[in-house]
Amino acid sequence: MRDMRRIMQVGVVVLAALLSWRAHADDRTVVAHATVRGHEVPVYRIGELRAPDTPAGMDGFAVRVAYVLRAWTQEHGVEAIGNLCRTPEGTQWGTMLLTIGAHVASPVTNACPVGMLATGVDIHSHPQRQHYRANAVDQLFLGRLPSGPVTTRPDDFGPDDFGHPGYMVGRVGLHYQRGLQRMRLVRDMRLPPPLDPAGDVRRVARAHEVGPMLVRALQP
């Protein structure tokens, strides 16, 4: 992810407190709007995932989410993101997956499934190809619409990713960082998933699809 998250962060966080209620109360895909350089950008909810806690803890849940995020990004080409959230008693993990349909940025919020609290750690996907064509949302961040393909490094953290701890799923791996000097590979994404995520992927909406809130309980 490029140096773009702080540009849109304030616009999204202002509405973040509403996200849990709105996701529960209505059936629209657009759950908020981010302000990016004076332009309003819709924030889409593409799904919600839950799972019971396991001995693998946060890493274990992040791996499950990573396969869903990577599959979604492979299909749509753009980034998506979710906070890693937990119930107060620590028995369940969950995340609300969001996107603005951009290749270069994801919405930074404190949104969580109802009944859960943000851990301060998120997970986001990167485009799965080294080259992509920028779209109108990317143009708001880049300041221009490139005439040709944009080159990216799917498995590298962007500078703004280091603003807080987080996971990133690229083309090859699931990575975690707690600063420039504290990065590690969590999982080789070329390995088969620890469980078949096909059913979960089917319950994650298309980026601009309007439908009911999508909830999937992942079983251990």
Image (tube, rainbow, N blue to C red):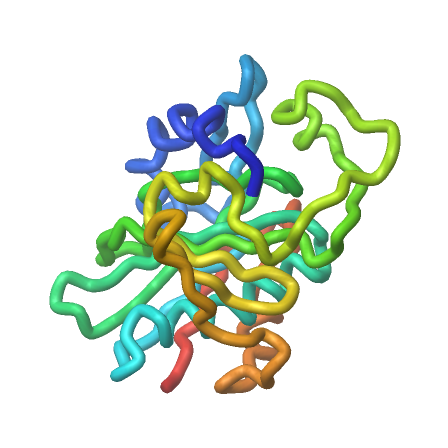
Q: Decide if residue 17 is on the left or right side of residue 167.
A: left
- Front position in the image: 74 or 151: 151
Quadrant for residue 206, please give it: bottom right
Image position, residue 218 (x, y; %): 41, 78
- Front position in the image: 51 or 30: 51
Q: Taking 76 as reference, is 50 above or below it?
A: below
Residue at x-position 70% and y-position 46%: 152
Image position, residue 4 (x, y; %): 53, 31
Residue 90 visible at all = yes
Q: Taking 97 as reference, is 53 above or below it?
A: below
Residue at x-position 67% and y-position 32%: 138
Image position, residue 79 (x, y; %): 60, 48
Residue at x-position 75% and y-position 34%: 135
Identify the residue at the far left of this view: 89
Q: Decide if residue 151 is on the left or right side of residue 53.
A: right
Image position, residue 80 (x, y; %): 55, 50
